[in-house]
Image (cartoon, grey):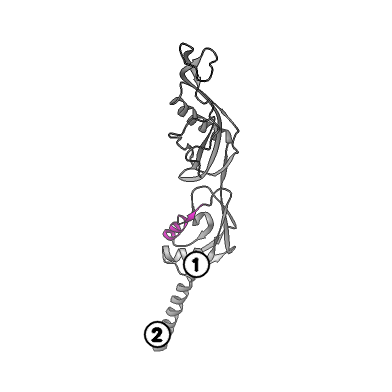
Amino acid sequence: MKPLLVFLSALLATAAVGAAATPAVSIELRPEVRAAGPVVTLGQLARLESVDLPLLRRLVDLPVGRAPAAGRSALVEREALLGWLRRRLGLEQQQVEWRGPVASRVSSFTRLVAGEDIAAAAAAAVHQWLGSRSPRSEASLAGTPRDVEAVQGELRLQPRALGQAALRRRLTVWVEVWAGERFVRVVPVTFAVAAWGEGLSAAQSLATGALVQGASLPGQVDLLAGAGAGAPLAGAHA
């Protein structure tokens, strides 16, 4: 009976070693990945196989980082992923079977934000600001900004506040472009401005130093007479 016990012990030991050597998961990186959202998961990066279904679900949903900005890409390598799996899930190197390429290049799905839409957001802000400072005003677009490439997400065009800036013949509004919670860039939009307000206008030409006695009548005057183009408004720095 003793030789049989020795044989069974050896067989069990061999089975244990074989079980320990069996990978818990197989990971095959995709060479190119386009991320649709702000966060990239392992399930987007790779094809995953495992007999442990709870582990497989955790791996599929495991976040590995933020998606790159529009027009950029990021390289995710096996070694970096293995360190991440060890820290987050306690997986060791012998528990992971790697297949396919050694790295995956990640970029983001993008869309173009029309320059006309950016200009429209700026125009609304300019007209509201002018309306609080002059009973009559005009603002014409000096030039349509270029289209902006942005990642996917809820689009928000947010003009920076004009605040207490002085009236000028040329005003620049800075419009922030956001996709979801991600800031994309800030775009300058410039307008040619005219504004009028109540004042006294001369009914006839007056000599320098002459007394104004009945020679001026109430009416609308150019509030920007003599005003230069000036510098961009406060908030012009990106």
User: What is the quadrant of the N terminus in the image?
Assistant: bottom left
Give the secondary structure at mark 2: helix
Name the residue at the front extreme.
209
**In this rendering, is residue 69 above or below 91?**
above
Would you name the residue on which mark 2 appears? 5
Residue 142 percent location from the top left of the image: 59, 31
Q: Which residues are magenta?
A: 53-67
Could you tell which of marks 1 and 2 lies nearer the N-terminus? 2
CA–CA distance in space, label 1 to label 2:
34 Å
Can you say whether 154 is above or below 11 in the image?
above
Q: Find residue 225 and name its label.
A: none
User: Closest to the observer: 66 or 99?
Assistant: 66
Amino acid type, residue under disc 2 in the picture: Leu
Seen at 56% across and 34% down, the residue is 190
Magenta-span inclusion, residue 61: yes
How far across and how far down the image is residue 172, in percent? Answer: 53, 35
Residue 24 against residue 166 in the figure, above or below: below
Q: Position of residue 232 (x, y in %)?
A: 52, 38
Q: Position of residue 205 (x, y in %)?
A: 55, 15
Q: Judge whether residue 171 is colored magenta.
A: no
Q: Nearer the viewer, residue 180 or 191?
A: 191
- Of circles 1 and 2, which is in front? 1
Return the mark for residue 96: 1
What secondary structure is marked by label 1?
Answer: strand
Would you call the spot at circle 1 few (<14 residues within 10 Å), some (14-19), or many (20 or more)?
Answer: some
Return the residue found at the far bottom: 2
Instruction: Please tell me which residue is depicted at 44% across the width and 26% down the height of the picture.
Output: 133
Which of these two is toward me, 71 or 58?
71
Mark 2 Cα shell of 10 Å, populated few (<14), some (14-19), many (≥20): few
Measured along the vertical axis of the image, is residue 200 above or below residue 140?
Answer: above
Q: Amino acid at mark 1?
A: Val
**Could you tell me how many numbered marks the image carries?**
2
